[in-house]
Image (cartoon, helix red, strand yellow):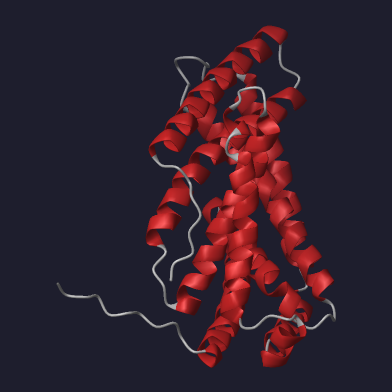
Amino acid sequence: MTLRPVRLWPDSATILEHSKDIFFAHWEELLRLKRTAMKTSDPDDIHDLRVASRRFRAALELFYPLVPKGSKTELRKSVRNLTRTLSGLRNIDEARLFFQARANTDIPDDNDLYRKLSELRSKELKQIEKALKNFCHRHLDRLVRKMVAGINEVSIKERNSISLLAYFSDVSIRQYMPIHQLLACSIMPELRAPRHALRIAIKKWRYFFEIIAPILDRDYTPVLELLKEYQSILGRMNDIVEFEKLVSTMRLPPTEQAHLGKILQAEDAALLESLTGLMSRKPLNYTFLI
């Protein structure tokens, strides 16, 4: 029998340098996509920027305890506000796609819903354009560079961590705990709040693995693919909630409101069935690849 060779962890200095490089790379990607979105105003570029802002926020939260105090709160708030501003457009675009997929069958093409969604979309684009112009990238870039420079052995020891590897292991356990607690109650039809919390917890754990994979030189593909499956269903269920909010803000005839409500309820029920089946077929258990 041939034994597979033990794959060694990178040494502490290598993990530290990789951590700093990955953290800064996420920031550079955010700035690159911001410049692109400002030039094009293309929906795909704006949506890519929203995802990049979420990934950078995940990296910031991971290394937050290790960076100098300074103005890191300002950076966290600025990027969070950017993400929120970009999210409105995404919800509207997804709602249009969802309802258009049911055009000529459940919903007529000339429905007031599409006109009102277009009006909302125009308003969101104006808010996004303003937010991108007001995003102080030069000032924030200086803060990020200072943070990256401040991640060192001293900051790790000050946090009472033996090593970054031990710190990552601790973070992974803490991020899985709410997932473990929420899984059982998330399949109860009447409880939407646990599903919302589960979606966020799974997304955070997925981003965590995506960040540390290149840092530790480990292949987390199996767990990432499973997390994406869960996140996809839970994300669509959250979309239904957002679509309901959008529809409720529109002054549509009561019969039309009721019709749209039935469509959304049917989709929500189908997604819950898919989630229940996924949990049965592929349980989401704890892992931290060694």
Q: Residue at x 38, y 37 (%)?
A: 281
Q: Determine whether, in the image, residue 7 is placed left or right of residue 147.
A: left
Q: Residue at x 46, y 85 (%)?
A: 10
Q: Quadrant of the C terminus?
A: bottom left
Q: Quadrant of the N terminus?
A: bottom left
Question: In the depicted view, which residue is nearer to us: 231 or 14?
Answer: 14
> Can residue 123 be seen?
yes
Quadrant in the picture for residue 138 = bottom right
Q: Is residue 175 above or below residue 162?
A: above
Q: Residue at x 63, y 17 (%)?
A: 261
Instruction: Residue 227: give x, y in percent of width and height.
Output: 48, 50
- Outermost residue, front side: 1
Instruction: Residue 203: give x, y in percent of width and height.
Output: 58, 52
Q: Determine whether, in the image, residue 245 is placed left or right of residue 273.
A: right
Q: Residue at x 75, y 84 (%)?
A: 142
Instruction: Residue 36: give x, y in percent of width and height.
Output: 57, 67
- Outermost residue, top side: 255
Question: In the depicted view, which residue is nearer to us: 30 or 16?
Answer: 16
Question: In the depicted view, which residue is nearer to us: 221 or 177?
Answer: 177
Instruction: Residue 19: give x, y in percent of width and height.
Output: 57, 81
Q: Is residue 16 above or below residue 81?
A: below
Quadrant in the picture for residue 66 = bottom right
Q: Is residue 160 above or below residue 247?
A: below
How many numbered callouts?
Answer: 0
> Can residue 27 be seen?
no
Quadrant in the picture for residue 253 = top right
Q: Determine whether, in the image, residue 283 is placed left or right of residue 177.
A: left
Question: In the depicted view, which residue is nearer to us: 176 or 240?
Answer: 176
